[in-house]
């Protein structure tokens, strides 16, 4: 009876590991979609409302979900305190603190880091072009992540189940 319980627990845990990998892929898709929304809102705030960056970050933070809302609030606070002279430095530090442990890949963080380094220096038209370019990058990454999820979701679940079955046969 105990062996049967152990075998069932082994199968369940391996299947759950496959499901956790799928959940992490879904989290990345969600964050990329939020990044896309954030970029569109930031472009509108800068281009149409002529809002200062720190005010725009605060306004947008109320309309996006965590961890991006936390990131934007922290960037806004540091900009208002004047802790760093350079927005790029603030952006990079907050990326490391707020978004490093999320489901985003290093390439996603690198493109966001590049965006932060270019905001604030240019005139409004150039900032909008920079945001449009970043929007294209995020949209492409989102499409790619969705495609990857569709391709690999079933595989990871089946691999989890298969690994569980293999361990049960091997150990019991």
Image: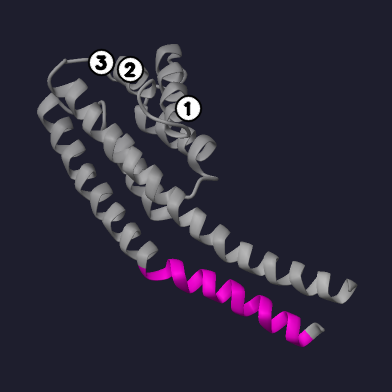
Image marks 1 and 2: residues in contact by CB distance under 8 Å? no
Q: Compare residues 118 and 23 and report the one nearer the observer.
A: 23
Q: Compare residues 92 and 99 and report the one nearer the observer.
A: 99
State which region is magenta.
151-170
Q: Is residue 145 left or right of residue 99?
A: left
Q: Which residue is mark 1?
A: 70
Q: Is residue 129 left or right of residue 80?
A: left
Q: Is residue 53 left or right of residue 128?
A: right
Name above or below for residue 148 compared with residue 110: below
Farthest residue, direction left: 125
Q: Residue at x 30, y 52 (%)?
A: 142
> In the figure, residue 105 lies in which quadrant?
bottom left
The mark closer to the camera, 3 or 2, is 2
Q: Secondary structure at mark 2?
A: helix
Disc 2 residue crowd, few under 14, some 14–19, many 20+, Cα 10 Å: some
> In the figure, residue 127 lies in which quadrant?
top left
Q: Earlier in the sequence, mark 1 or mark 2?
A: 2
CA separation in Å, label 1 and label 2: 12 Å
Image marks 1 and 3: residues in contact by CB distance under 8 Å? no
Farthest residue, direction right: 2
Q: Residue at x 51, y 70 (%)?
A: 156
Q: Earlier in the sequence, mark 3 or mark 2?
A: 3
Disc 1 residue crowd, few under 14, some 14–19, many 20+, Cα 10 Å: some
Marker disc for residue 52: 3
């Amino acid at each position: 009876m105990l062996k049967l319980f152990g075998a069932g627990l082994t199968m369940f845990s391996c299947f759950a590991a496959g499901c956790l990998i799928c959940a992490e892929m879904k989290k990345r898709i969600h964050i990329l979609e939020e990044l896309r929304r954030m970029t569109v809102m930031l472009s509108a705030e800068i281009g149409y409302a002529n809002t200062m960056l720190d005010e725009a970050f605060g306004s947008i933070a109320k309309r996006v979900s965590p961890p991006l809302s936390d990131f934007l609030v922290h960037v806004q606070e540091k900009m208002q305190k004047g802790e760093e002279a350079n927005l790029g430095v603030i952006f990079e530090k907050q990326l490391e603190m707020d978004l490093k442990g999320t489901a985003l890949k290093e390439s996603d963080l690198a493109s966001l880091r590049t965006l932060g380094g270019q905001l604030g220096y240019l005139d409004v038209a150039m900032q909008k072009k920079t945001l449009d370019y970043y929007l294209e990058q995020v949209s492409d990454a989102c499409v790619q992540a969705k495609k990857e999820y569709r391709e690999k979701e079933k595989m990871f679940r089946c691999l989890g189940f298969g690994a569980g079955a293999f361990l049960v046969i091997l150990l019991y």
